[in-house]
Amino acid sequence: MVIVTHSENETIREGERLGRTLLPGDTVALRGGLGAGKTAFVKGLASGLGIASPVTSPTFTIVNEHPGSIPLYHFDMYRIGDESELYDIGWDDYIVQEGVCAVEWSEKIENALPAGTVRVTIENLGGDTRRLEIRREPIRRSAHC
C-alpha cells in the first residue's frame, strides 16, 4: 500500500492506523533518510497501541520501552555497526517478549528481522510531504521482535 501524507500529523495518523492492527510479536521495520518521519510514524504506532507515554527517538539509548497492554519496544539502529552488535544491546531478550518492536534504520539488521515483518519505507518528497509504502510480509505468528 502506498500513501502520501502532507503533514507530520497525517504521518502520525497513518502510524496510528497501522498500530491498531498490530498484535504481540509483530515487528515494524522502518526505512528512510534522516528527517524522513520515522519517529513521527512510531508516535502514531504507539497511539494506535493505546500507549500514552511520549515517544522520542532512541538514537543514543538504542531502545525505548513503552509499557501498555501490548508494550512497544522502539529501536533506533542508526548507531549499530552491524548485526553482531544486536546482542550487546539485549536484542535476544526482546525477541522473546510479547510486545511490538518498531525498528528505525532496520536495513542495518535486515537478516535479524523475523518473517512476517511489516515494512514501512518513508520518502521525503519535499516540505512536509511524505510517501509511505507499507508492506506486510507473509505472517508467521511467533513471540519474536
Image (spheres, rainbow, N blue to C red):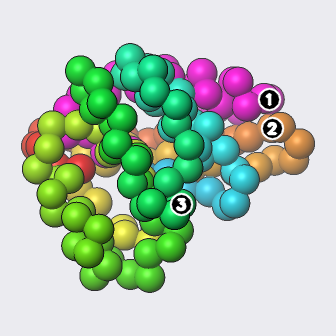
The correct choice, above or below, for 98 with respect to 88 in the image is above
Point out residue 24 in the picture as x, y percentages from the top left corner. Answer: 20, 32
Residue at image point 44% right, 82% down: 81
> N-terminal of the two: label 1 or label 3?
1
Residue at which label 3 appears: 59
The reply to whether discs 1 and 3 touch (Cβ–Cβ < 8 Å) is no
Q: Secondary structure at mark 2?
A: strand
Disc on res. 129 = 2
Label 1 is placed on what type of residue? His
Q: Residues in magenta?
A: 1-28
The verdict on residue 7 being magenta is yes
The reply to whether discs 2 and 1 touch (Cβ–Cβ < 8 Å) is yes
Q: Is residue 115 visible?
A: no
Report whether 52 appears left or right of 140: right
Crowd tier of the residue under label 2, counting other residues whose Cα lies within 10 Å: few below 14, some 14–19, many 20 or above:
some
Residue in the foreground of this view, choosing between 128 and 115? 128
Report whether 145 appears left or right of 11: left
Label 2 is placed on what type of residue? Thr
Residue in the foreground of this view, choosing between 93 and 38? 93
Crowd tier of the residue under label 3, counting other residues whose Cα lies within 10 Å: few below 14, some 14–19, many 20 or above:
some
> N-terminal of the two: label 2 or label 1?
1
Report whether 75 appears left or right of 111: right
